[in-house]
Image (tube, rainbow, N blue to C red):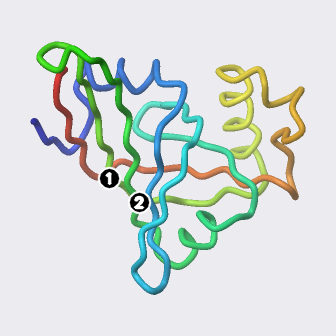
Amino acid sequence: MSATSGFGGAQAAFVERARVARLGTTMLDGTPHVVPVCPVLDLDRIVIASAFDRKVANIRDNPAVCIAFDEYSDDWDHGLFQVIVYGDAYLVESGPEFDRDAALLNEKFPQYPVSTSPIEVGSTVIIEIRIVRVSSSGL
């Protein structure tokens, strides 16, 4: 397992391909909260969209987050891969940055614009994760 303050090439490629990851936040009482999310890697940050829900409330109270990307195989010697990103989350609710992030998410996940949960100001918040530390194994 390796740990760095930023992405290596293989780590970035693995995260960039990921269609789903698991985002961990912490509730006020210290209880962990983990949910699946659909991420986009944009240079040195990870971008996701969310309704105004528990994870957003947790981030407002404590911006420290962890997001896990993994690939499982029954071939444990050659098929287990993971990248764990630790970072600080920022909430973007409107403006040019919101529009740019929404475009990135809509491009990677064309389901967003035609789903029952399109990315829209007022009903969606963009969560930007600024990377503090990265660890990985299998890459």
Q: Secondary structure at mark 2?
A: strand
105 left or right, relative to 95: left
In the image, is residue 51 above or below residue 67?
below
Give the CA distance from mark 2 to mark 1: 6 Å
Position in image of residue 97 (x %, y %): 68, 45
Q: Is the C terminus in the top left, top right, bottom left or bottom right quadrant?
A: top left
Q: Residues within 10 Å of mark 2 (few under 14, many from 20)?
A: many
Work out which residue is located at the far bottom of the displayed protein and give it.
Answer: 29
78 left or right, relative to 131: left
Position in image of residue 10 (x %, y %): 25, 18
Identify the image quadrant of residue 135. top left
Question: Label 1 sits on what residue type?
Answer: Tyr
Task: Please state the total of marks drawn on the protein image.
Answer: 2
In the image, is residue 91 above or below residue 70?
below
Q: Residues within 10 Å of mark 1 (few under 14, many from 20)?
A: many
In the image, is residue 117 above or below residue 10?
below
Q: Which residue is mark 1?
A: 86
What residue is at 84 percent from the left and 42 percent from the top?
A: 117
What residue is at 79 percent from the left and 31 percent from the top?
A: 112
Question: Label 2 sits on what residue type?
Answer: Val
Identify the image quadrant of residue 14. top left
The answer to whether the residue labelled 2 contacts the one labelled 1, judged by CB atoms less than 8 Å apart, is yes
Q: Secondary structure at mark 1?
A: strand
34 left or right, relative to 55: left
Identify the image quadrant of residue 106. top right
Which is more N-terminal, label 1 or label 2? 2
Instruction: Give me the disc on residue 20.
Output: none
Position in image of residue 49 (x %, y %): 67, 45
Q: Which residue is mark 2?
A: 65
Position in image of residue 63 (x %, y %): 46, 68
Q: Is the N terminus in the top left, top right, bottom left or bottom right quadrant?
A: top left
